[in-house]
Every structure is written in structure tokens, then in C-alpha cells.
Amino acid sequence: MSDLHSTVASVLADRYATNGASVRKLAGSLSNSQFWQKPFPFGNSFGHLVLHLTGNLNYYIGAQIANTGYLRDRAREFNDPNPPPKEQALEGFDEAVAMVRETIRAQSPDDWSREYSGVGTTAGNRLDMIMQCAAHMQHHIGQMIYLGCEWKQQSGGLK
């Protein structure tokens, strides 16, 4: 059983590191202006997706599993009228990913199946919630890829 526990913790921690690196790489080509502007009249900016993922991880894993005391303002994640500079937003995201990876590594074999009861989720245990957050990140990374391609096309970089 401990081999499975080690494998699960390692795979999940690595998945979060990979997802975090993907967000950083995708953000790298965007100016601060592009990071915060919507290239379409609908949807979200890349930056607001970063704030959203940061809040999601800090609440569902940080506050609910790691007991960080984080208080979430979900609405502000999408419409903060004075968002931080791009690099500051990405640093907050990096810190959230690091916290998640640390929390994953701190789980004992019995912790994975401990009851989970965060607001706004159907997760019944910690493993389920950590998996849901990883899938949620992947979903938004897909949106970020699309936003990056649109900014590149608008700049004349894609034909």
C-alpha cells in the first residue's frame, strides 16, 4: 500500500508542477496589457484565469486540506478592477501550486480517503478534490492556449 501512496503523491505533485509550468510558459509571450485584456468581447482574460486558478487552489486545497485559513473572493478573481501586475499574479499562482505540491506530499496513506466537505464541490474525499482541481487547471490551460493563439494571430504571428 505504501508503494501506491508514494506513486499517487509523486504523480499528482508532478502533474501540478507540469500544469504550473505550462501556465508560466503560455503567459511568457503576453505583454502585461495582453495578460489582462480579453481578446474577445466574451470570456475571460488570461490574467483573470490565473487569479481564478490561484483562488481555486488556495481555497479547495489550501483552506480545506492544508488549513491555511485562506478566504476566497471568487467574484473578484474574474472582475478585479485593479488587478496586480502580470508577474505578481504569476508569483501568487506559483505559490499556490507550491502549496498544493507540499500538501500532496504531506498526505499519509489514510489521508487520501478522508472526508472532504468544501463548499461548491461534489468531492467526497481528499484524493477526489485534488484530482478535480488538477482537471480544472487543465481545462483552463486549454482556454489559455486559445487566448494565447488569438493574441498571436492579432499581432500578425499566426497565419
Image (tube, rainbow, N blue to C red):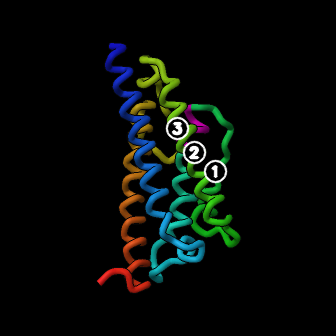
Q: Residue at x 60, y 45 (%)?
A: 95
Q: Quadrant of residue 79?
A: bottom right
Estimate the spatial distance between the alpha carbons at disc 1 and disc 2, rounded to whole Å: 13 Å
Compared across the picture, whether 6 is left or right of 29 comes to left
Task: Kindly identify which residue carries mark 3.
Answer: 100
Which circle's residue, 1 or 2, is located before the other in the chain?
Answer: 1
Quick check: marks 3 and 2 in contact, CB under 8 Å? Answer: yes
Q: Position of residue 54 (x, y in %)?
A: 56, 52
SS class, disc 3: helix
Q: Position of residue 76 (x, y in %)?
A: 63, 63
What amino acid is labelled 3 in the image?
Answer: Val
Task: Kindly identify which residue carries mark 2.
Answer: 96
Q: Residue at x 49, y 64 (%)?
A: 27
What amino acid is labelled 2 in the image?
Answer: Ala
Image quarter where the N terminus lies is top left
Q: Position of residue 143 (x, y in %)?
A: 39, 65
Determine the main secondary structure of the stretch shown in magenta. Answer: helix
Magenta residues (range): 58-65
Estimate the spatial distance between the alpha carbons at disc 3 and disc 2, rounded to whole Å: 6 Å
In the image, residue 15 sits, relative to residue 89, either above or below, namely above
Q: Residue at x 37, y 74 (%)?
A: 149
Task: Kindly identify which residue carries mark 1.
Answer: 72
What amino acid is labelled 1 in the image?
Answer: Arg
- Which of the two marks, 3 or 1, is nearer to us in this view? 3
